[in-house]
Image: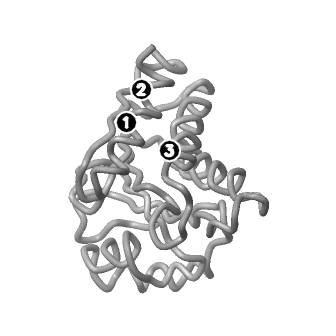
Amino acid sequence: MYGQKKCKIDVILGDIVEQEVDAIVNAANSSLLGGGGVDGAIHRAAGPQLLEECRTLDGCPTGEARMTRAYRLPAKWVIHTVGPVWNGGSAGEDMLLESAYMNSLRLAGEYGLRSIAFPGISIGAYGFPVERASVIAAGAVSRFLETGSTLTDIRLVCFNEIAYSTYSMAVDELFRK
């Protein structure tokens, strides 16, 4: 039991665009206008209306989050967050990554969402070490749930076996004691 309600936390090996949840999180770039990796996959799956709505948001600074409709995705909403580019760890990357998770979770809470799916923010092209990112992600989820939440289903969706095993270990360390 975390916070005021029980919340299921799962680590999944799969594709973020296939998640049937209230919101999926997009590991976006600061323009919010699409890109490669998760961002490109979400924009392609959602259709051109997502890009049109993103154009109205005027971007998003690193560590913050914005929300749009999900259009052709099975989710209802897309929460766009910008994770940090890894620069060796001395440029505030840990704090910015934690902020990206926390601000996404807060936005889900503000809208009363019950389920959310995250990709591994910053672990692809942005080069954040997967071991370090997994601990930050699990810790942010844990701290957020301590504050009370409407969320009952949080998924960490991993795109490969390495991310899956690493995120699974981090979640197990915090939540399966």
Badge 1: few (under 14), some or many (20 or more) residues near its Cα, within 10 Å?
A: many
Q: Out of 138 and 81, give the one closest to the viewer.
A: 138
Element marked by disc 1: helix
Question: Can you identify the residue that label 1 sits on?
Answer: 168
- Identified by mark 1, the residue type is Ser
The image quadrant where one finds the N terminus is top left
- Side of 93 relative to 154 (left or right): right
Q: Residue at x 69, y 63 (%)?
A: 88
- Identified by mark 3, the residue type is Ser
- Side of 95 relative to 51 (left or right): right
Circle 1/circle 3 CB separation < 8 Å: no
- Work out whether 51 lies above or below 151: below
- Work out whether 30 lies above or below 141: below
The image quadrant where one finds the C terminus is top left
Q: Out of 22 and 125, give the one closest to the viewer.
A: 125
- Side of 37 relative to 55 (left or right): left
C-alpha distance separating marks 2 and 1: 6 Å
Element marked by disc 2: helix
C-alpha distance separating marks 1 and 3: 8 Å
Q: Where does residue 126 sit, x and y in percent of width and height?
A: 54, 70
Q: Name the N-terminal-most of marks 3 and 2.
A: 3
- Identified by mark 2, the residue type is Asp
Q: Out of 61 and 163, give the one closest to the viewer.
A: 163
Q: Residue at x 41, y 33 (%)?
A: 169
Circle 2/circle 1 CB separation < 8 Å: yes
Q: Where does residue 80 sit, x and y in percent of width and height?
A: 50, 65
Question: Can you identify the residue that label 3 sits on?
Answer: 134
Q: Residue at x 62, y 54 (%)?
A: 97
Question: Can you identify the residue that label 2 sits on?
Answer: 172
